[in-house]
């Protein structure tokens, strides 16, 4: 199987250097197509950009445990930012370089405050660590797919081990409305982000993809202004604010398009490749 370009290239053969030293790509709805594959065109464009001097880094809301199989399938061996910035992971060495956990006492308090405001929530939780399980509670709607999870019925199970984040769902509110209400209610205790359909997350206060990406970029000795970032959801807004150039996919949430420097084709139409190919022609 052909692979995504290595994280950092030492090639000096390219006639013209790539205009950015770092390419940061979200996974779902951005780098990945709906079937969790990466097109050959996108692989080739990333390989060409890497050969021209750029580094590629994956920045995803998924935890490491929900991402490792993708890295293995793609032959990806570089740094990755996972868990909305909580985890910086070295895919080649299969080890966590940094990991930030959610204060469980604060999270429990935040959860109770939100439920007091809008009623009972369906709950899921992502445990810390490379093999951290994702726990799914009663009533929590899980999208069909290959991602493993562990059902729970006793709420005490959620708090029994360190967590990177909580997932919440409401039976009547939309994802955007739930995120807004939760943020207004407990935004002084935790961060709340909408990361995809049915995915509203409670995170440590101050955590975002920009947090993890800045840590990873520092390890690579690359500055924010030298970074081009691709994404599709509101959880990518901080990453766009940090990077020198933010590119939203055609399928992106309107709030991300509103702050993007440009909008490309959708993830199903090789939107990343479209931008990279144009930059390589300059």
Image: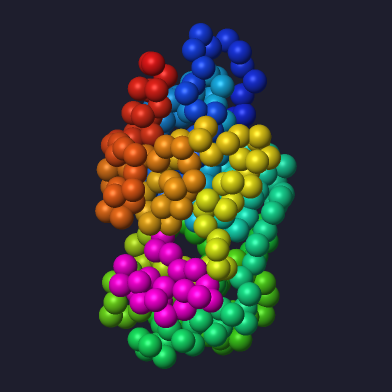
* Residue 114 image offset from top left, x and y in percent: 43, 83
**Closest to the observer: 272 or 242?**
242
Vertical comparison of 235 with 202: above or below: above
Quadrant housing residue 107: bottom right
Identify the image quadrant of the C terminus. Answer: top left
Q: Is residue 269 left or right of residue 163?
A: left
* Residue 269 image offset from top left, x and y in percent: 30, 36
Q: How many marks?
A: 0
Residue drawn at (33%, 35%) of the image: 271
Vertical comparison of 45 with 245: above or below: above
Q: Inspect this view and state whether residue 67 appears.
A: no
Magenta residues, start to end: 176-195
**Closest to the observer: 44 or 277?**
277
Q: Inspect this view and state whether residue 276 appears.
A: yes
Residue drawn at (60%, 66%) of the image: 164
Q: Coloured how?
A: rainbow
* Residue 106 image offset from top left, x and y in percent: 59, 80
């Amino acid at each position: 199987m052909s692979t995504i370009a290595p994280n950092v290239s030492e090639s000096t053969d390219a006639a013209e250097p790539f205009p950015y030293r770092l390419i940061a790509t979200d996974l779902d709805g951005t780098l990945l197509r709906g079937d969790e594959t990466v097109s050959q065109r996108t692989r080739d464009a990333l390989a060409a950009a890497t050969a021209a001097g750029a580094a590629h880094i994956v920045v995803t809301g998924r935890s490491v445990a929900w991402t490792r199989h993708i890295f293995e399938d793609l032959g990806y061996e570089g740094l990755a930012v996972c868990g909305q910035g909580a985890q910086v992971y070295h895919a080649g060495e299969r080890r966590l370089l940094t990991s930030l956990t959610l204060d469980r006492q604060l999270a429990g308090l935040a959860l109770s405050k939100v439920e007091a405001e809008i009623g009972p929530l369906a709950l899921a939780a992502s445990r810390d660590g490379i093999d951290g399980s994702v726990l799914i509670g009663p009533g929590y709607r899980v999208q069909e797919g290959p991602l493993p999870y562990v059902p729970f019925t006793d709420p005490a199970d959620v708090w029994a081990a360190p967590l990177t984040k909580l997932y919440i769902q409401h039976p009547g509110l939309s994802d955007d409305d739930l995120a807004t209400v939760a943020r207004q209610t407990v935004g002084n205790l935790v961060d709340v982000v909408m990361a995809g359909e049915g995915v509203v997350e409670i995170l440590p206060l101050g955590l975002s993809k920009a947090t993890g990406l800045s840590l990873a970029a520092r390890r690579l000795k690359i500055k924010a202004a030298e970074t081009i970032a691709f994404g599709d959801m509101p959880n990518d807004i901080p990453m766009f604010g940090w990077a020198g150039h933010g590119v939203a996919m055609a399928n992106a949430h309107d709030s991300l398009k509103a702050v993007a420097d440009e909008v490309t084709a959708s993830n199903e139409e090789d939107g990343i490749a479209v931008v990279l190919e144009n930059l390589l022609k300059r």
